[in-house]
């Protein structure tokens, strides 16, 4: 484990979705340096096999460790669902947090007995959220729905147009009139649709659980516990790496983060 508090926080995702985690970390831990890796050459992960996802996660974890990160945040729900153990085995003593654990804890804390979960095909197919929720409360009712079109819509920036609203309306229909009051956004792309979801559910308000906020809070707690909070009073640096399309990524990243990014570097995770 990197024992130096000035070491960076490592965050990775299959693409741009993990930027919602990066933004939440910047808000809660503004003095921390961040190294972000987006696997833009191989996105989306949600339609790939567990074996392939584990291989990708292994490569990216090694890349982050080469940059001496002090903690790793898995900002991808698909990786959290099928490759968390793989990441931990490679990370060794470097602590690892994932969005599923953080999101389920926040959802349970709402006190709801009926929770909805939306995610990629891989995340929903793994039953990771349902298993995590029922481990905390066996009596809880979980309704899950895979929403595979939402990731490419988010990557395209289509979050509130006619196509996006229609897709959301169809995907979220199982959560109407069945007692669900809490909805977990089981993909870090999905917080981009929060406003649209609230519009669709005006007459049936949902408490939306944003796993990006949840894991940022968990990271803050973990760093304090491990005495690894960066003592700097300056704004942290944000270093960004991708496996393809750096210019497109930079455009989207600056829109999502609301700040300029000096440089996005392309690297081959292999």
Image: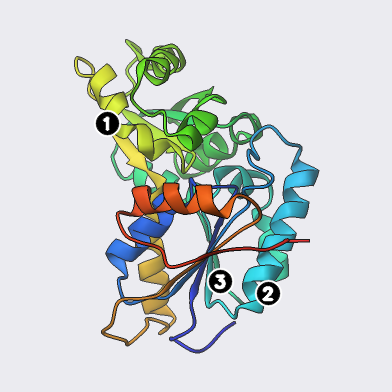
Mark 1 and mark 3 lie on one chain; the one further toward the N terminus is 3
Label 1 Cα crowd, 10 Å radius (few <14 / some 14-19 / many 20+)? few
Q: Which residue does the image show at 36% across and 62% down from the upper left?
A: 25
Q: Is residue 225 above or below residue 15?
A: below
Label 3 Cα crowd, 10 Å radius (few <14 / some 14-19 / many 20+)? some
CA–CA distance in space, label 1 to label 2: 39 Å
Front residue (pair 219, 20): 20
Q: Name the residue tied to disc 2.
A: 92
Q: Which residue does the image show at 42% across and 16% down from the upper left?
A: 163
148 relative to 90 in the view: left or right: left
Front residue (pair 221, 133): 221
Q: Which residue does the image show at 42% across and 83% down from the upper left?
A: 228
CA–CA distance in space, label 3 to label 2: 8 Å
- Report which quarter residue 131 is drawn in: top right
| Quadrant of the snapshot with the N terminus | bottom right
Q: Residue 95 carries which label?
A: 3
Instruction: Give percent across and percent down for residue 195.
Output: 27, 31
Q: Which residue does the image show at 41% across and 63% down from the upper left?
A: 261
CA–CA distance in space, label 1 to label 3: 33 Å
| Quadrant of the snapshot with the C terminus | bottom right
Q: In this view, does 208 lie above or below 265?
A: above
Asked which secondary structure carries label 2, the reply is: loop
Please identify, in this view, whether the residue under mark 1 or under mark 3 is nearer the observer.
1
Residues at badges 3 and 2 in contact (C-beta under 8 Å)? no
Q: Can residue 82 be seen in this view?
A: yes
Instruction: Give percent across and percent down for residue 42.
Output: 69, 44
Q: Name the residue tied to disc 1.
A: 195
Asked which secondary structure carries label 3, the reply is: loop
């Amino acid at each position: 484990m990197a024992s130096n508090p000035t070491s960076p926080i490592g965050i990775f995702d299959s693409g741009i979705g993990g930027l919602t985690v990066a933004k939440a970390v910047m808000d809660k831990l503004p003095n921390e340096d961040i190294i972000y890796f987006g696997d833009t050459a191989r996105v989306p992960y949600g339609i790939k096999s567990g074996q392939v996802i584990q291989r990708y996660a292994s490569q990216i974890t090694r890349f982050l460790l080469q940059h001496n990160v002090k903690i790793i945040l898995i900002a991808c729900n698909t990786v959290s669902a099928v490759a968390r153990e793989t990441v931990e085995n490679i990370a060794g003593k470097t602590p690892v947090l994932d969005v599923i654990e953080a999101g389920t804890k926040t959802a349970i804390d709402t006190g709801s007995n009926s929770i909805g979960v939306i995610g990629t095909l891989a995340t929903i197919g793994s039953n990771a959220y349902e298993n995590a929720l029922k481990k905390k409360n066996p009596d809880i009712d979980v309704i899950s729905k895979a929403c595979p079109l939402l990731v490419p819509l988010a990557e395209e920036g289509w979050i509130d147009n006619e196509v996006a609203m229609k897709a959301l309306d169809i995907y979220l229909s199982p959560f109407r009139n069945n007692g669900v009051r809490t909805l977990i956004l089981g993909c870090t792309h999905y917080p981009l649709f929060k406003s649209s979801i609230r519009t669709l559910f005006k007459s049936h308000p949902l408490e939306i659980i944003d796993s990006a906020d949840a894991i940022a809070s968990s990271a803050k707690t973990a760093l304090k516990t491990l005495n690894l909070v960066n003592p700097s009073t300056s704004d942290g640096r944000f270093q960004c790496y991708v496996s393809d399309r750096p210019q497109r990524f930079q455009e989207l990243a600056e829109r999502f983060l609301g700040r300029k990014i000096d440089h996005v570097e392309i690297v081959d995770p292999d």
